[in-house]
Image (cartoon, rainbow, N blue to C red):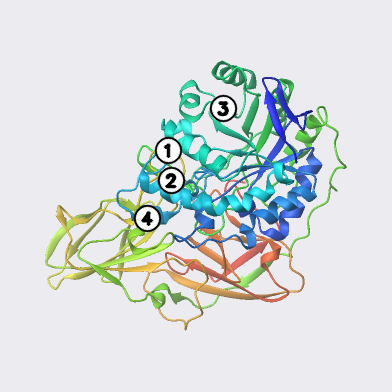
Amino acid sequence: MSSLTYDQHGFALDGEPFRILSGAMHYFRVVPEQWDHRLSLLRAMGLNTVETYVPWNLHEPRHGAYDFGGRLDLRRFLRAAERHGLKALVRPGPYICAEWEAGGLPAWLLADPGMRLRCSHPGYLAAVDRWFDRLLPELLPMLAENGGPVLALQVENEYGSYGTDAAYLRHLADGLRRRGAGCLLFTSDGPDRAQLQGGTLPGILPTVNFGDRAAGHFEVLRAHDPAAAPVCMEYWYGWFDQWGEPHHTRDAADAARALEEILAAGASVNLYMAHGGTNFGWLNGANLTDGRLEPTVTSYDYDAAISEDGRPTAKYWAFREVLGKYTELPEPPPREEPRRLAPRTLRLSEPVPLAALYGEPVRSPYPLAMEQLGQAYGLVLYRTEVSGPREAAELRVDGLGDRAQVFLDGRPVGVLDRTGRSGDGPVEFAVPAGGARLELLVENLGRVNYGPALAERKGISGGVRLGQQLLLGGWEMVSLPLEEAPEPAEPAAAGDGHPVLRRAEFEVAEPADTFVHTAGHGKGVCWINGFLLGRYWDIGPQQTLYLPGPLLRAGRNELVILELHGPAGESVELLDHPVLDRQA
């Protein structure tokens, strides 16, 4: 049994001085076959701890249906960390931010129109309590007090940048204790007086998150709680990318300088991220700035010390040198390039219209939001008949979440897009005398993961207006969650601008990592052997999707892409290197 304690100078583990030298690595962003390799790199850099979030929305994708298998096997991940000589910090949320869909909160919460998140709303607290009832039995055997590697658990996440409901935080902290967690509990917030006031609790260790100017930020922490150990729980030395924005990088020497300032102050640190991994599937998050949605790209490389595909970067070696001044270093990892598949060109099949997958619709007098349809992610097709004749008028969608391809009698007439990245202006059209069929194919681009807009519904949560008139009385909705690759279907003609599925089969003698080069294929998603790698979009900056070798198999493999705006090229390339910067 181990015990982590602290005073204003730092930590002690079983009574001996202990500095937490941690790196963030999220098990759910890395395939399990690669956990050992990535964890070994963390340890070889000089770190003694790994930190991870726990994504509620992956572990409970549907109300009452839990999943702790495969890449969600939290216990297996923590035992792997232990094998590599690493302690662990676990941040169970329930909210995690993390540039992850809805900050890890399950979409099914939003099927309740009265739901209020991250506060003492009875319905929310009841759902959180049920989740913690299921999660804590997974964690308790992993706690250091029970012989496991986990030193401490976090209460919520950066709550001070969101709200001020101290009773909600106390409910979470008391709930962890009541369910058997006797370990150290901590919070993490920005180094700002208001954020620390809103996000901390008496008796719970406060920590701060920042990317530079350590001395000043630790002064703010000391002023808030003179008894707190100095900890930078998220040292932001890299950053995430968003579609249509520049690729983020930071000079390795500058990042190492800021790390040395943290350590020279006697503080503990968690590198965010040590290894970023990938936002597989539809699970990227988004920000909302002045009404504009800013979705995060599929890659979560984060310009981290260990790249998305597991290579030590210049930051890795610079950090190792700094860490060596404060701890005894293990043997360095070998400086060798990982094995890759040889580059190749994959010929794509004839297109199959996405419409071939349309099932029986749900009918309603008005559009229903994605959550009301029992759907979390993917696409929803909305369809109605519009009477005519009508002069040209503007189509408006209230509560659009988030991007709608608009078709009139099968003809594409424009795109409505909350990101402002699709290049179209207002969508206007006239309706002929016989009326017309209006269809909107709406994509959830990722729920907001930070700030006050967490409870936004997806699909269409308001109304559809042509001019000033609401279109009511006869809507059909077809759910297209597309979590797994669609089954093969016969090729058929698709209208111009209509979404299509394309396939490519290829042989692999020995599986190894590769990169799917999606430049020139517009916008869509990509599966490999049924597993959804994630989204691509030619606006960049990301131009390749990382395909981990363990997702391939010796022999035949199948790649499927959904091209949302119709066929765009006859082939797709597999590269032996990533392209994360469109300008590179």
Q: Do the residues labelled 2 and 3 touch (CB within 8 Å)?
A: no
Disc 3 secondary structure class: loop
Residue for badge 1: 451
Disc 4 secondary structure class: strand
Classed neighbour count for the residue bearing mark 3: other residues with Cα under 10 Å, few (<14), some (14–19), many (≥20): few
> Residue at coordinates 78% horizontally, 31% vertically from top-left?
323
> Residue at coordinates 70% horizontally, 63% vertically from top-left?
549
- In three-dimensional space, the C-alpha distance between marks 2 and 3, rounded to whole angstroms, equals 31 Å
Q: Are marks 3 and 1 in contact (CB under 8 Å)?
A: no
Q: In this view, does 211 lie above or below 313?
A: above
Which image quadrant is residue 43 in? top right
Residue for badge 4: 403
Left/right of residue 244 with respect to residue 311 in the rendered view:
left
> Residue at coordinates 76% horizontally, 74% vertically from top-left?
509
Task: Tell me residue 479's x, y (percent).
Answer: 37, 67
Residue for badge 3: 203
Three-letter amino acid code of the residue under disc 2:
Val
- The numbered disc on residue 448 is 2
Q: Do the residues labelled 1 and 2 touch (CB within 8 Å)?
A: yes
> Residue at coordinates 68% horizontally, 50% vertically from top-left?
141
User: Does any portion of residue 156 appear in the rendered image?
Assistant: no
Classed neighbour count for the residue bearing mark 4: other residues with Cα under 10 Å, few (<14), some (14–19), many (≥20): many
User: Does any portion of residue 53 appear in the rendered image?
Assistant: yes
Q: Is residue 471 above or below residue 541?
A: below
Mark found first going from the N terminus, 4 or 2? 4
**Quadrant location, the N terminus:** top right
Viewer-proximal residue among 36 and 90: 90
